[in-house]
Amino acid sequence: MRKHLYLLSFFAIFVLLSSTASAYLQVQYGEPDNGEHGVEIQPVCEAYVYDYDGGLMNISFYEMIDNVDCGLTGTWVHVITYTLVPSGEYSFWFENASTYNRSYGWRVDIENDTLSTNRTFCFTTDSYYDLSFCFCSSQFIMLIALAMFIFFFSIGYNTEKRSGGIFETYSGFVLLWFETLIATYVSLPVVIGLMTPIALIIILLGILKFLYHEKEGVTEQY
């Protein structure tokens, strides 16, 4: 009987020590949270980490951009490490999470002199393109490309001279560039599929206008 009590005592101490060690370092929460949808592109990922002993930690963030449906089967890429820091909230800018309607993974690893732990998160970005007061770099470039297309196409279309063909042709190439930006940052396959033939038609019409339109300053004699 006494032998059984000793064994139960050792088992209880082991369980107590194991539970204490597992809670010694902890990632208490993360934002964006695991499984969260509708996250804006290029979010700031932040986590609150805690050392129950009040010691200093090394905190490392990793990102996964080739992730599919939160399967977390891609490659982890190191982003930043905070060295010998206390408990608190730490973050990094997930700049590569720049495509709409796509899943991304991020992870935080913490360690001190004796213990280590980590926590993994996965989120999915917005499924639509929203221009409302979000002047991130990708949207700014897309707005510039769209403005350039409208500007050059308007000049080319309204100019009856051969130079109008040059502007039209250039606007077609700008539209192809705009299509590339949409393919990179936005998930709109229908729009992307329509842009290529439209851009090629504009380029062809611009070339024809330049080659066969009456030269500037030359009029027919009757």
Image: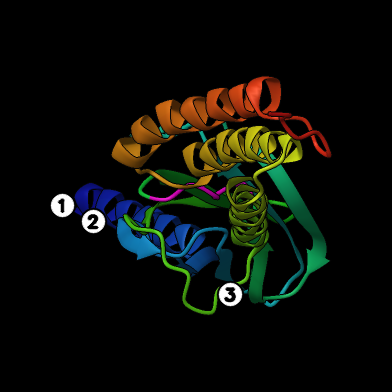
Q: Position of residue 89 (x, y in %)?
A: 63, 76
**Residue labelled with disc 1:** 1
**Residue labelled with disc 2:** 5
Q: Residues within 10 Å of mark 1 (few under 14, many from 20)?
A: few
**Closer to the camera, 43 or 204?**
204
**Closer to the camera, 204 or 43?**
204
Q: Amino acid at mark 3?
A: Tyr
Q: Residue furthest front?
A: 222
Q: Residue at the spot x=55%, y=22% of the render?
A: 204
Residue range of the region highlighted in magenta in the rendering: 96-100
Q: Residues within 10 Å of mark 2 (few under 14, many from 20)?
A: few
Check if mark 3's residue and mark 2's residue have beta carbons within 8 Å: no
**Residue labelled with disc 3:** 52
**Residue 9 covered by magenta stretch:** no
Check if mark 2's residue and mark 1's residue have beta carbons within 8 Å: yes
Tell me the element at label 2. Answer: helix
Q: Position of residue 43 (x, y in %)?
A: 55, 64
